[in-house]
Image (cartoon, rainbow, N blue to C red):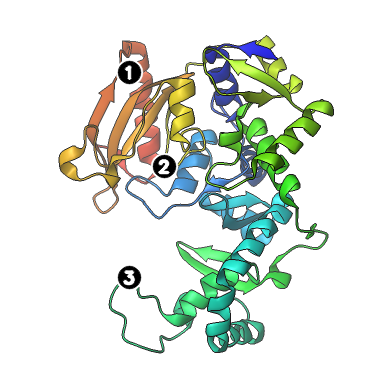
Amino acid sequence: MKNISTEEAKYLAVSNQFLLKSNNGKTKNNVLKIIEQLGYVQIDTISVVERSHNHILWTRLPSYKQSMLHSLLEKDKKIFEYWFHAAAFLPMRDFRFSLYTKERFRKQYGNWMLKNKKMVNFVTDRIKAEGALRSKDFEHTGKKLTGWWDRKPAKAALECLFMVGDLMISSREGFQKAYDLTERVLPDGINTSIPDDEEMFEHLLLSRINSFGFASTAEAKYLRKVKPDVMKKVIDRLIEDKKIIQIKIGELKDIYYSSEEKLKQLRKKFNSELIHILSPFDNLVIQRKSLKNIFGFDYFLECYLPSAKRKFGYFNLPLLAGNEFIGTLDAKANRAEGKFIIRNLHLNGVSAQKNTALYKTIESLAGFTGCSPDF
């Protein structure tokens, strides 16, 4: 077992998350490289500042444009949409691992699909005949809708067929998704063999190590159920094959795993002066327990709290300076008025130099949202 300090762990995490160096790339291939390195980019509907996938990619690629992502999805078919621990854009190279989840959804939704066979067949037949269709292309039939929770039957069928893998998302216009038959969307030559339990956990563990430099089993299987004996078999085999090694991080009690290749990064460690304003759904911060363990940053997105209980603001964004979190920014992009409004700013011991750099980063983020900072 090798020992590394928490400071070294921070460096590995931030470096492997593409947050230590300025990325001057300007092409969609740079976007693809980021998605492949991170393993996924989460999609979320909240747009107080910017949609999470756009914010996450812009943070790592200042020249990022949404058209790059759309091209990778619709034209090049280098990425696809599916469920990771949440809705996400995923690299097409990892498509077969989505089949593991799809099989489980097929078992979960089997009774619903039988009960609603007529609607499922209706939706499938229309897409076969007409090509990709959106939810709004289906008129509502059935009982009167009483609220957002009472989805029209065709929408439920579309989402079910998507989750079980019969349909894929072929394109997007904002949050309007166009669904098509999987065989018409999937590129030729893609591996479609369904992974077994061990293959799936190996993928999750190695992906986490690749994107962070290290991983615990809890981090690798985040929000997934994996049998302990499966994890043990995979870890023992990977250690024996010298693909991973066991490490200890500072005084933390958890067991972590890394690789000799990842630990070599510590030999050329350097300090970074970059400041980032992260999305609450950014890959670096989404696992809050890991964030607190490694960085000592106890973060909670307060839009989920009643207003009386908020300390840092409705949409408080984490602020990262180099390897350290220095506070949060509660902001809102008022696109109607073209103003980027700072509602709250909480900083912990920030120097004047970092403060200047932070305001430049705020200006950049404001510009990305199509607004000007309202300082």
| Residue position marked by numbered label 2 in the rendering | 368
The answer to whether any part of residue 375 appears in the image is: no
The quarter of the picture where residue 235 lies is top right
Residue at screen point 38% across, 27% down: 319
Q: Nearer the viewer, mark 3 or mark 2?
A: 3
On screen, 259 above or below 35?
Answer: above
Residue at screen point 24% across, 32% down: 312
Three-letter code for the amino acid on which mark 2 is drawn: Phe
The quarter of the picture where residue 149 lies is bottom left
Three-letter code for the amino acid on which mark 3 is drawn: Trp
Query: In the picture, which quadrant includes the C terminus?
Result: top left
Q: Report, in whole angstroms, how far the alpha carbon at label 1 lies from the one at label 2.
A: 20 Å
Q: Report, in whole angstroms, how far the alpha carbon at label 1 lies from the one at label 3.
A: 43 Å
Query: In the picture, which quadrant includes the N terminus?
Result: top right
Q: Nearer the viewer, mark 1 or mark 3?
A: 3
Under circle 3, the secondary element is loop
On screen, 189 above or below 338?
Answer: below
Mark 3 or mark 2: whose residue is earlier in sequence = 3
| Residue position marked by numbered label 1 in the rendering | 355
In the drawing, does residue 69 fall left or right of residue 93? left
Q: Residues within 10 Å of mark 1 (few under 14, many from 20)?
A: some
Under circle 1, the secondary element is helix
Q: Nearer the viewer, mark 1 or mark 2?
A: 1
| Residue position marked by numbered label 3 in the rendering | 148
